Image (tube, grey):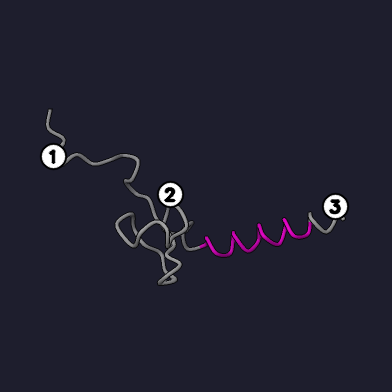
Amino acid sequence: MSLRGRIDPVSEGQWWFCLKHMRVEPDKGCPNKDRMGPYPSEQEAAGALQRAADRNKAWDEADEDDD
């Protein structure tokens, strides 16, 4: 059985946010060590930094409440 031309369903349609270039990239892009993701849509990848900032703020506030 030949795998030539077969599309990998796991990587199809995945999007990443590149921290090196500060932009959204498709699955074929910079190395994963420089990116956040994967995300199921370009729009979700575009919001990666904001989601990370929101989560960090919530975790910081939870830590303050624990003190």
Is residue 8 one of those drawn in magenta?
A: no
> Element at badge 2?
loop
Per the rendering, the mark at residue 44 is none
In front of the other: 34 or 51: 34
Sequence-first tag of 2 and 1: 1
Disc 2 crowd rating (10 Å Cα; few below 14, some 14-19, many 20+) is some
Name the residue at 44% across, 71% down: 22
Per the rendering, the mark at residue 66 is 3
Q: CA distance from mark 2 to mark 1?
A: 25 Å
Sequence-first tag of 3 and 1: 1
Name the residue at 63% across, 64% down: 53
| Residue 2 position in % (x across, y down) | 12, 32
Name the residue at 78% across, 59% down: 61
Name the residue beneath numbered marker 2: 40
Mark 1 residue type? Arg
- The answer to whether residue 41 is left or right of residue 47 is left
- Location of residue 50 by image quarter: bottom right
> Element at badge 1?
loop
Mark 2 residue type? Pro
Mark 3 residue type? Asp
Name the residue beneath numbered marker 1: 4
Quarter of the picture holding the N terminus: top left
- Location of residue 55 by image quarter: bottom right
Residues marked 2 and 3 touching at CB (< 8 Å) = no
Sequence-first tag of 2 and 3: 2
Residue range in magenta is: 47-61
In this view, the residue farthest toward the top is 1
Residues marked 3 and 1 touching at CB (< 8 Å) = no
